[in-house]
Image (cartoon, helix red, strand yellow):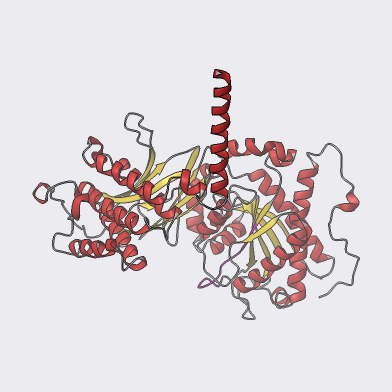
Amino acid sequence: MGKVMRKGYFIYIICCILLLWLFILAGGISPASSWALSSQDAYVRAKRDYTDFKSSPRTKYRQFWLEHIDKFKKIYSNEPEGPAAPECLYMMGGIYQALYRYSGRPGDLSAAVDMYERLCNRFPKSPQAKEARASLAKIGGPENNAPAGEAAGAKAEERPKLERTPVIKGLHEVKDIRAWSNSDYTRVVIDAGDQVPFKEHLLKKDPDIKKPKRLYIDIFQSRLGPNLRDPIPIMDGLLRYVRAGQYKKDTVRVVLDIESLKKYKVFYLLNPFRIVIDVIGGRAEKGKEKDSGQLTLTQQLGLGVRRIVLDPGHGGKDCGAIGINGLKEKDIVLKVARKVKQKIEERLRCSVILTRDKDAFLPLEERTAIANTKKGDLFVSVHANSAPNTEARGIETYFLNLASDEDAMRVAARENATSTKNISDLQKILNDLMLNCKINESCRLAEYVQDCLANGLARRYEQVNNLGVKQAPFFVLIGAQMPSVLVEISFLSHPLEADRLKDEGYLNDIAEHLADGIQKYIRDTEMAYLPVPPDRTHTGLRSEAPSTKRR
């Protein structure tokens, strides 16, 4: 009898579960709303955690404030139009404002203002917007440092007095901080007013207080610019924040909060002076291991090319060289790069990214950052040459290294928009920068490009001068994490070559042979690691019949 009752009870439970599931499928209950934590629930939990935090001793550590901001930021990012969105914006503003009471950093107050203003603009009729406007009014008051409401965590009479850093005459201004990032690489650029001394230092992780590893740069004889906000969120898994402050009366400190670090490089560029920080994460190899079962041998070895970055030089306010016929380098190289992109995408199973696809100005350091953050496998910067001697002509391809001769120094100085003296100074620190820049592969790529471009054009045109492969310290190639070259397609200062550069047919031939060089490099690199040589009749290279040479 007992067995029968247990069996009946078991059947009853099964039936109840089936009925419940049928009800869910019929639309009575959403599984997501039943089991997933809603944004409103997550907000309530985050607010409760922050309330507990305010009365804890951890308030003296900045990182814990940022962790609570991150909680509300995540909820807001998941549902920027959700019911908890205005509340999250208000809480982020309140926490930044409360943090300012402890830190005294103007950037924290600026971040609070930014959150409040965003709330008022996006949700102007919400109750939180009314409170945000009241907070903004207080921030703009005579004290200019009083956190509003309960977020302050202290009574008005207990607020510490915050001393303002006096401005010292003659200091150079740190104007801006820019960043480009992915999960394995981040480039941070600090724009300073003039060339000033600086020093970097790496602080190890502090496990006792869960403080992350930090890299900081002290910039001497400097003051923080009024428009520089702090912190700048990166949140890519490699860096969390970049923050700046007036560390001493004459020293600005820029701090990078690091989550995963394999190596880093710090160097400077000139005209204008800027400090460049490249941070490389330690997770790239782990990602490759996960995918290795689906990749070819060459791809597992990092030799497979799936993404090519083409960089048309100059652009926008930077015209580059101007030919004797009025042609501008920025226009010519953009046309060529677009043609190369089309030809490569037609031939190869890889994508092509242009650093610029219109007449726009890009700093040199940003072009390299684009190539790295887009995880390019090859980087080719396209330029047109110029020289004081109008008889100079020909085609040459460069890879990053110490300058090989005075002409290489001149070309590098022109493309870097600096002087040959500055190039000479740069070479003193270049050895450290080139430890991991794939010089050998860049040299091979340059040889393929130069050979196909110069010899290909010589079959159709007269007086094509093959100037060969050279090396020089080009800013645009510094820090590239893939084989990278800079090609000078012709001289705008030479009458014959300047005239040819007006001809769409000539530009198309340049693009054709440049694509040949890239394709040949890819094919021969991959063939070197194949167990059986492929049928060379299916290489995909253009077969061109001999034709009459053109002047």
Q: Provide residue 197's location: percent of width, then percent of height.
A: 35, 49
Q: Residue at x 57, y 72 (%)?
A: 359
Q: Residue at x 55, y 56 (%)?
A: 370
Q: In the depicted view, which residue is nearer to us: 381 or 102?
A: 102
Q: Provide residue 88's location: percent of width, then percent of height.
A: 34, 54
Depicted 399 relative to depicted 358: above or below: above
Q: Provide residue 485's location: percent of width, then percent of height.
A: 65, 54
Q: In the image, is 94 to the left or to the right of 501?
A: left
Q: In the depicted view, which residue is nearer to us: 4 or 464?
A: 4
Assign the N terminus to one quadrant of the image. top right
Q: Provide residue 54's location: percent of width, then percent of height.
A: 23, 42
Q: Is residue 318 magenta?
A: yes
Report the predominant secondary structure element of the magenta stretch: loop
Q: In the image, is 152 to the left or to the right of 310?
A: left
Q: Is residue 14 magenta?
A: no
Q: In the image, is 85 to the left or to the right of 265?
A: left
Q: Give the magenta part as a residue range.
A: 309-319
